[in-house]
């Protein structure tokens, strides 16, 4: 069977009607992390996933596995050597520890995906610019263990993992350009998660690329829509300035928004719910705690699956077949 005999959006639009006639499919929840930097948050997220039976997606920025002393080995499109909007590892030891988390997360079934390298705004990039950055990402990851002086510690299968196991992408700042999709296809990207949608929506397949979007969800006393991502909440709640004195309040607002968005789909069409975070504990960790509360409550439900993007694609593919919708 071909992966998508019909456009994915058309196939998936039939799912709710079919599933209600048989049995509701599982509610999918996809938690993702942009940047994937701080090592203690790698450990915290992996421990959480193990505890609640979840799989996450990590959109990795490759400069975070380059030590600062070697920063000039990286040059982003239209940038000076050594420049990165997301920084570098402070030391080789920090980068080596991060590489260990990347590999262990991969072995545990999580998605390791690309967030390119220097976290630049690609809104005006050409296809050639994107291609350059994708190739740099691959080159940096391929040689990362050697670069940090730990070639002897490189896991067997690492290079194959970099070459064949990293198939997803999210553009920094959700900033895309007309040449991006062409470059993604050339780079072997299977899915893109750079869109923002008016609410939870089914993914779409277009020109051989599966497109996901973080949804706008109601939040706060007035229920104003906001992207389901910690940074956007951080800007709304405190203007982008840390205010730990109100951390509990911000956590409760965020949890309530996440839970309401989940309940709406769980009780309704069962459209996958996507939530994005960063490896930064903004406003005293309010947004991580809200996410942790949600996944602790819902991931163990029999009819809920907290999955990576790759797992979601495979599960949604099966839903295209009416005979296989039951129990999925």
Image (tube, rainbow, N blue to C red):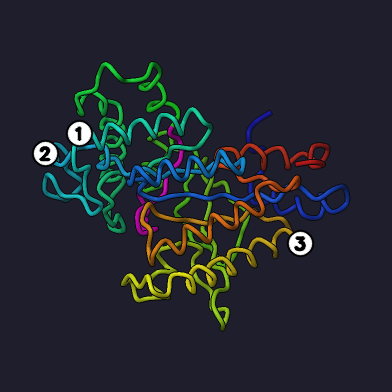
Task: Check the image and report above or below for 239 versus 154.
Answer: below
Residue 43 vs residue 269, the one in the foreground? 43
User: Is disc 3 placed on a helix, strand or loop?
Assistant: loop
Mark 3 sits on what residue? 267
Mark 1 sits on what residue? 92
Task: Check the image and report above or below for 220 versus 122.
Answer: below
Q: Which circle, 1 or 2, is nearer the viewer?
A: 1
Q: Which circle, 2 or 3, is nearer the viewer?
A: 2
Magenta segment's dominant SS is: loop
Label whose residue precedes the other's in the sequence (2 or 3): 2
CA separation, marks 2 and 3?
A: 52 Å
Q: Quadrant of the N terminus?
A: top right
Q: Is residue 35 left or right of residue 217?
A: left
Q: Are marks 2 and 3 in contact (CB under 8 Å)?
A: no
Q: Which mark is residue 307?
A: none
Residue bounds of the magenta highlight: 166-179
When asked about the image quadrant of residue 314, the answer is: top right
Q: How many marks?
A: 3
User: Residue 269 placed where, x, y %?
Assistant: 74, 59
Q: Are marks 1 and 2 in contact (CB under 8 Å)?
A: yes
Report if residue 157 is visible in the image: yes
User: Residue 52 placed where, x, y %?
Assistant: 61, 44
């Amino acid at each position: 069977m071909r992966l998508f005999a019909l456009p994915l959006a058309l196939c998936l639009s039939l799912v709710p009607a079919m599933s209600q006639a048989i049995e509701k499919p599982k509610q999918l929840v996809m938690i993702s992390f942009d940047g994937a930097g701080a090592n203690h948050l790698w450990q915290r997220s992996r421990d959480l996933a193990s505890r609640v039976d979840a799989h996450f997606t990590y959109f990795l920025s490759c400069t975070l596995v380059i030590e600062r002393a070697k920063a000039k080995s990286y040059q982003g499109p239209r940038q000076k050597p050594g420049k990165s909007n997301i920084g570098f590892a402070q030391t080789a030891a920090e980068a080596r520890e991060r590489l260990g988390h990347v590999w262990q997360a991969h072995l545990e079934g999580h998605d390791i995906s690309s967030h390119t390298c220097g976290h630049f705004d690609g809104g005006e990039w050409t296809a050639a610019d994107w291609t350059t950055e994708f190739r740099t990402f691959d080159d940096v990851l391929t040689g990362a263990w050697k670069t940090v002086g730990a070639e002897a510690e490189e896991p067997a299968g690492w290079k194959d993992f970099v070459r064949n196991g990293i198939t997803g992408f999210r553009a920094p700042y959700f900033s895309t350009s007309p040449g991006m999709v062409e470059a993604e296809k050339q780079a072997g990207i299977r899915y893109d998660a750079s869109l923002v949608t008016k609410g939870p929506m089914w993914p779409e397949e277009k020109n051989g690329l599966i497109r996901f979007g973080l949804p706008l969800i109601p939040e706060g006393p007035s229920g104003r829509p906001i992207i389901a991502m910690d940074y956007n909440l951080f800007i709304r709640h405190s203007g982008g300035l840390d205010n730990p004195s109100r951390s509990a309040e911000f956590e409760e607002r965020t949890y309530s928004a996440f839970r309401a968005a989940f309940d709406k789909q769980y009780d309704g069409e069962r459209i996958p719910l996507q939530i994005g975070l960063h490896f930064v504990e903004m406003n005293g960790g309010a947004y991580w705690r809200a996410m942790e509360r949600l996944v602790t409550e819902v991931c163990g439900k029999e009819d809920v699956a907290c999955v990576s993007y790759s797992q979601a694609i495979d599960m949604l593919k099966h839903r295209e077949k009416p005979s296989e919708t039951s129990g999925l």
